[in-house]
Amino acid sequence: MSKVRLSSPIALMIENCRAGGVSDQVLLECLRSEDFRSLPPIGDGKMNFDKLLETANEIGNDWESAILNGYEFSFITITGIRKLLAAKYRKQLNQDYDQDDLVIKGLILQVDEIASLRELISRQWNVIEETEHDEQLKRVRIELKYQNS
């Protein structure tokens, strides 16, 4: 079964909710009822859940399957990757990694985090293991798969 492909704003909303301590079950209940008042402030506190839900419904995103069975980004920019790294992995630009044009380098992740990142962004981006810190931590580089030379 292929994974649901989500637009960046929708996928980042899910990851921000998860990072904010919202369980998948609570998030699904809010989405089904279209009532987000029970959620704590998420991300910068300015997330417009109603607009995101409207957008997802217009696009035809399958929320439930994405949340329960996993998803991948249909398209994600380098800025979107930075937002994903901040929300899901608590990694910040210039603190935990550097960016050189369309390449993120010096990022240290656990082996399971590398696997989950690959599942999310591998349609467009390569996640390349560079060096090993120990059995569980590795330094990785993220680069665009297709670039004009």
Image (spheres, helix red, strand yellow):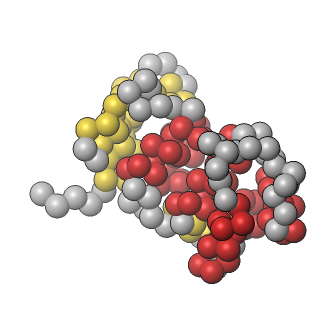
Between residues 59 and 113, which one lies in front from this camera angle? 59
**Residue at screen point 50% across, 25% down:** 137
Q: Is residue 130 visible?
A: no
Image quadrant for the C terminus?
bottom left
Left or right: residue 13 versus residue 111 is right
How many labels were placed on the picture?
0
Between residues 16 and 121, which one lies in front from this camera angle? 16
Q: Residue furthest front?
A: 46
Res. 59 image quadrant = bottom right
- The correct choice, above or below, for 138 with respect to 58 in the image is above
**Residue at screen point 80% across, 65% down:** 31
| Percent x, y of residue 27 | 80, 56
**Residue at screen point 81% across, 49% down:** 39
Res. 108 image quadrant = top left
**Residue at screen point 44% across, 26% down:** 96
- The correct choice, above or below, for 140 with respect to 73 in the image is above
Image quadrant for the N terminus?
bottom right
Left or right: residue 27 versus residue 146 is right
Between residues 16 and 124, which one lies in front from this camera angle? 16
Q: Is residue 140 visible?
A: yes
| Percent x, y of residue 5 | 56, 68
| Percent x, y of residue 75 | 45, 64
Left or right: residue 31 versus residue 8 is right
| Percent x, y of residue 35 | 84, 63
Left or right: residue 41 versus residue 125 is right
- The correct choice, above or below, for 38 with respect to 31 in the image is above
